[in-house]
């Protein structure tokens, strides 16, 4: 079954009409509960929740505008002034094309259009998080405003090896070695830890935020087979000024969506906010410190919250072909291969979520929001609060089947190394090793069914 753009709320047939009898819906298709949209176009990740209060449309549109806005260098007679002094891109959408995944450059001549490099040195900051590099901070910013040198340039050179599956099929896997040039503030040093990250999807985040802490803790306590564990990350909540369970970020290293967004404005664009009012300059970056500001802060509280509201209310695309025989067989294989032990589904959001539309929703994100040791092949060697250099948060799989329709250049895994879903599976190690080997051992027919199931999500 295919879902096109049809007349209705924001161009999409509202779920309320579907459930009232205007059309029949298999509940297995409702990945985001009532916050599901039936759209498999390139705009599938860009729709408002169909149960959003229409009175809030202005806030959603404002947040969308801020997410897509290109920021300019201060001083300027422009509300969008404030870019930098150091930055990676000029807009949020540059790393999250159509709200989807980013991709990695194909080699040393490619630029990091939707990728950044996290930096840290041994030790931890006062709250237990990664200790930033003394000269370059916690993220390499390649660009600077006029008069401020960019920090340097990172580029990737891949090593590639071939894995053989039980049916004789070959899968080529690549892993990036990171190199640097034109470093403005001296060598990084031998003890620096570097982790490449591509832009993640941003739809469905309000629903993930609405999963209760008790649900996450219960998932961590569940007995799991085949060496699979899973644990929570305890992080510093900058808004509440206390420790909290992490659920956002590649290592579940951020507690709230508001902080996640404020961090991105600061780290990626150099835009200050009420939560992070200081410019992203280190002590040795004197030109950065002298650069003019676009406001104090450059992003107002109302603008920050509009951006948060936009991301909270982005709908999740519906599953497709849920009653297809091959898809049903693939779903059984997904369970048999123990993939479901980490990519958990369904979950229910708490009854008192930040917005009523997010409350008490039965959702199918295919994540437990927990940290798992994924083995040496995926390790970045960089700890983040309780997360070790081998641990990663289980990424949600909802909507993953539309990845390349939305952005043909998108990659999978934290650094975009995997070009296909099968490559991503074959990188699983540690707690994911049983699942990887189960997929390796599958017949051609079964493996095709498993991948067909993933493409239906």
Image (cartoon, rainbow, N blue to C red):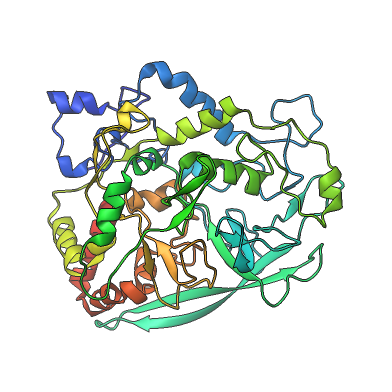
Q: Is residue 120 above or below residue 68?
A: below
The residue located at (36%, 49%) in the rendering is: 402
Q: Which residue is nearer to you in this view: 429 or 110?
A: 429
In percent of width and height, residue 176 lies at 56, 72
Residue 288 in view here: yes
In percent of width and height, residue 57 lies at 43, 20
The residue located at (33%, 33%) in the rendering is: 353
Q: Quarter-wise, where is residue 449 in the image?
A: bottom left
Q: Is residue 383 above or below residue 299?
A: below
Assign the N terminus to one quadrant of the image: top left
In percent of width and height, residue 310 lies at 46, 32
Q: Quarter-wise, where is residue 127 in the image?
A: bottom right
Residue 107 in view here: no
Q: Quarter-wise, where is residue 359 in the image?
A: top left
Residue closest to the far top: 55
The residue located at (36%, 64%) in the rendering is: 421
In percent of width and height, residue 25 lies at 16, 35
Q: How many marks?
A: 0
Indicate left or right for 427 with 443 as reference: right
Q: Which residue is nearer to you in this view: 271 or 73?
A: 271
The residue located at (18%, 59%) in the rendering is: 331
Q: Is residue 239 above or below residue 86?
A: above
Indicate left or right for 426 with 110 as reference: left
Indicate left or right for 185 with 54 as reference: right
């Amino acid at each position: 079954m295919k879902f096109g753009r049809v007349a209705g709320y924001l161009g999409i047939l509202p779920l309320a009409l579907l459930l009232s009898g205007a059309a029949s819906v298999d509940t297995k298709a409702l990945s985001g509960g009532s916050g599901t949209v039936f759209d498999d176009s390139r705009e599938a990740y860009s729709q408002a929740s169909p149960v959003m209060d229409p009175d809030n449309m202005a806030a959603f549109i404002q947040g969308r505008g801020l997410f897509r806005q290109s920021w300019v260098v201060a001083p300027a007679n422009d509300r969008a002034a404030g870019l930098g002094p150091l930055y990676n891109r000029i807009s949020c959408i540059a790393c999250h094309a159509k709200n989807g995944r980013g991709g990695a450059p194909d080699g040393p001549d490619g630029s990091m259009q939707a990728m950044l490099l996290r930096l840290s040195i041994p030790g931890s900051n006062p709250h237990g998080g990664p200790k930033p590099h003394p000269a370059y901070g916690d993220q390499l910013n390649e660009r600077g405003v006029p008069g401020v040198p960019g920090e340097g340039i990172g580029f990737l050179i891949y090593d590639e090896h071939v894995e053989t599956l039980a049916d004789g099929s070959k899968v080529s896997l690549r892993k990036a070695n990171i190199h640097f040039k034109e470093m403005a503030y001296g060598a990084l040093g031998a003890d620096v830890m570097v982790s490449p990250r591509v832009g993640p999807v941003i739809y469905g985040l309000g629903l993930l935020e609405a999963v209760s802490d008790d649900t996450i803790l219960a998932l961590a306590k569940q007995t799991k087979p085949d060496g699979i564990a899973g644990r929570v990350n305890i992080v510093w909540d900058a808004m509440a000024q206390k420790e909290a369970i992490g659920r956002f970020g590649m290592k579940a290293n951020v507690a709230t969506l508001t902080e996640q967004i404020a961090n991105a404005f600061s780290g990626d664009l150099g835009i200050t906010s009420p939560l992070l009012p200081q410019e992203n300059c280190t002590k040795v970056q004197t030109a950065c410190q002298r650069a003019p500001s676009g406001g104090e802060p450059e992003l107002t509280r109302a603008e920050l919250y509009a951006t948060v509201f936009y991301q909270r209310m982005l709908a999740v695309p519906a599953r497709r072909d849920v009653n297809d025989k091959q898809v049903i067989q693939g779903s059984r294989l997904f369970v048999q291969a123990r993939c479901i032990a980490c990519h958990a589904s369904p979950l229910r959001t708490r009854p008192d979520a930040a917005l009523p539309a997010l409350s008490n929703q039965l959702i199918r994100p295919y994540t437990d929001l927990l940290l798992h040791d994924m083995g040496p092949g995926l390790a970045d060697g960089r700890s983040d609060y309780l997360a070790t250099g081998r641990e990663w948060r289980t990424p949600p799989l909802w909507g993953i089947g539309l990845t390349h329709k939305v952005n043909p250049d998108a990659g999978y895994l934290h650094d975009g190394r995997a070009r296909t879903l099968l490559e991503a599976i074959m990188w699983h190690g540690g707690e994911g090793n049983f699942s990887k080997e189960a997929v390796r051992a599958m017949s051609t027919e079964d493996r095709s069914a498993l991948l067909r199931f993933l493409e239906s999500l």
